Amino acid sequence: MRLATGARVMAEDVALVTREGPVYTGVDFTARPGTLTVFQADSGGGRSALLLTLTGRMRPTSGTVYVDGHELPGRARRVRRISSLGLMAEVNALDERLRVREHLSEAALLRFRPAARGLADAAVEAAELADLDRDTMVKELPALERRRLGVALALMAEPRLLAVDDVDGGLCDEHQVLMWRTLKGLSDAGLTVIATCADADALVDVADADVQGPLPIGQGEEPHDPPEDPGEMRPSAPFDEPARAEGPGERNTENEREKGGDHRDR
């Protein structure tokens, strides 16, 4: 499929801290269009929260993120429009009661604009699922095909930034290599891809000048004093309320709200 030109992403000393302590701290990096950037941390190490922040879906407590020149969290609405999430536990999990084609149809309906003819075909091909029988029930898919289907659904939104969480989770070494190759192929085609993993050994298979990482996710001391008013900090919610879900597979209704004008990010 013809991928949109990737978005430039820049983070400056970004941190997310809850009352229980730091989720991630000191995130500093720049991702150029057409590159793959990989963050590494164990489960509970802030991986999902960081990706949600970088795609405008979670508000950090300090620092600044720029995506395609849009500053977060102030321009989160714009960033959500140009970014998509691969599968993320408890955020946009696949419905095992549906068939692959039903997920693809739903993804087309959740776009902000009508889907071009052949978009689903292009998305599954880009995710290296061209040979997959679309009448297959999701519950029958092996782990690698589930991950790739999550990527295909994200590509249905034609994003400029693709965020993929837990790339290695549940995959054998061979399938980890295949998944990294899929993501590298997307970044080579021009997309900006940011991914997370626990085990980055298989990343060496695709490493080149356009692959950044693995970058460790820090959970050091809180960089700033917490706000006096607890209402100023709401990092525990995965999405700010005006856009609880964005992109295919996330049951987005923000396009309906557009008719009533912008809402203030909370």
Image (spheres, rainbow, N blue to C red):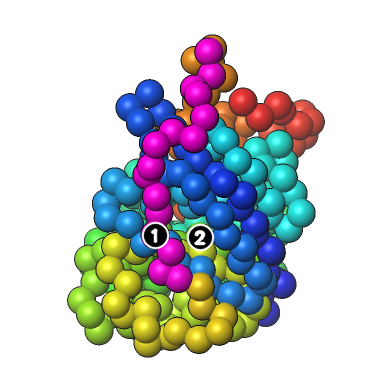
Q: Nearer the viewer, residue 138 or 35?
A: 35
Q: What is the residue that sits farthest to the top in this orientation?
A: 229
Residue 18 placement (x, y as % from top left) = 41, 28
**Quarter holding the N terminus?**
bottom right
Determine the residue positioned at 60% across, 41% down: 63
Left or right position of 245 against 218: right
Q: Nearer the viewer, residue 256 or 135?
A: 256
Is 122 drawn above or below residue 258 in the view shown? Answer: below
Determine the residue positioned at 50% across, 24% down: 225
Magenta stretch in the rendered image: 213-228
Residue 156 placement (x, y as % from top left) = 58, 64
Q: Which residue is mark 2?
A: 163
**Quarter holding the C terminus?**
top right
Determine the residue positioned at 43% across, 64% down: 215
Q: Closer to the N terminus: mark 2 or mark 1?
A: 2
Confirm whether the magenta stretch covers residue 88: no
